[in-house]
Image (spheres, rainbow, N blue to C red):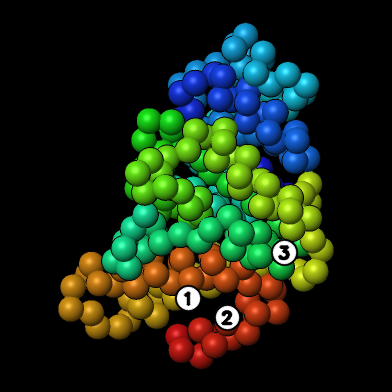
């Protein structure tokens, strides 16, 4: 199941437009994390048009609510270098290909940030990986509702909405946590020149395991390997 999460959304009209886009592509769960506008306002209601049922069920909460998801996928227009691991992105098409390997039972949240500044670094850090939409270098930032439409179009094109294809049993959020705990235990026993280098390794492994979208069978094999190293 794919949910759309808007973090710190500032404009009610965008909330309504995004609800409409979601209904176009068969999605129904819209989550607002610390919004700066009211989803029940007339502006949001008018923009939603025939997707007002999505607005009626909107969830207003804080970031801790997102722990319920197996995967958090951040979106960003601000690209990083190889040294800024959290901001090394994939394209929406690559995301669609990844999600095609995950069955509909996986809980997946796609996060979109504030209109003014996008997702903060600490919010990006909490995501498994990030997605960016290729745009002009002169003016790279899309309106948030347009960005949602582009990402969902790629998923819809791959016939992934309203549910992702049922192919393989995916690794759960808890199984992913266990794998990362094993990695952390191993890294904590290793010598690094500085504590920062150890933390960089931990972030790198978090991204790699998140991007891999492991099946349960793959996860069990990885856990077995990590246990031997441990």
Residue 62 at x, y percent in the picture: 50, 34
Residue 79 at x, y percent in the picture: 37, 54
Label annotation for residue 100: 3
Residue at figure coordinates x 52%, y 70% from the top left: 209
Label 2 residue SS:
helix
Residue 33 at x, y percent in the picture: 51, 32
Which tag, 3 or 1, sits closer to the chain's start? 3
Q: Nearer the viewer, residue 28 or 173?
A: 28
Q: Which residue is mark 2?
A: 223
Q: Nearer the viewer, residue 110 or 182?
A: 110
Q: Which residue is mark 1?
A: 182
State how far apart marks 3 and 2 are (Cα): 23 Å
Which of the 4 image quadrants contains residue 189?
Answer: bottom left
| CB-based contact (under 8 Å), mark 3 and mark 1 | no
Q: Which of pointers 3 and 1 indicates the residue nearer the eye?
A: 3
Residue 177 at x, y percent in the picture: 54, 64
Q: Which of pointers 3 and 2 indicates the residue nearer the eye?
A: 3
Q: Nearer the viewer, residue 213 or 17?
A: 17
């Amino acid at each position: 199941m794919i949910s759309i999460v808007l973090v710190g959304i500032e404009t009610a009209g965008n909330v309504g437009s995004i609800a409409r886009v979601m209904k176009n592509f068969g999605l129904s769960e819209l989550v607002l994390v610390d919004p700066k506008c009211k989803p029940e306002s007339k502006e949001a209601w008018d923009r939603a048009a025939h997707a007002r049922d999505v607005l009626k069920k909107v969830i207003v909460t804080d970031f801790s609510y997102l722990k319920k998801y197996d995967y958090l996928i951040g979106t960003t227009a601000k690209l990083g270098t190889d040294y800024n691991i959290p901001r090394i992105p994939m394209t929406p098409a690559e995301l669609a290909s990844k999600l095609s390997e995950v069955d509909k039972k996986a809980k997946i949240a796609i996060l979109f940030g504030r209109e003014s500044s996008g997702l903060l670094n600490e919010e990006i850090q909490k995501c498994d990986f990030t997605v960016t939409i290729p745009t002009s270098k002169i003016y790279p930032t899309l309106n948030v509702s347009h960005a949602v439409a582009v990402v969902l179009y790629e998923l819809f094109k791959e016939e992934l909405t309203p549910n992702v294809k049922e192919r393989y049993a995916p690794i759960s959020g808890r199984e992913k946590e266990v794998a990362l705990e094993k990695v952390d235990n191993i890294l904590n026993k290793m010598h690094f020149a500085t504590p920062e280098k150890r933390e960089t390794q931990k972030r790198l492994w978090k991204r790699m395991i998140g991007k891999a979208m492991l099946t349960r069978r793959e996860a069990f094999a990885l856990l077995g390997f990590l246990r031997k190293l441990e």
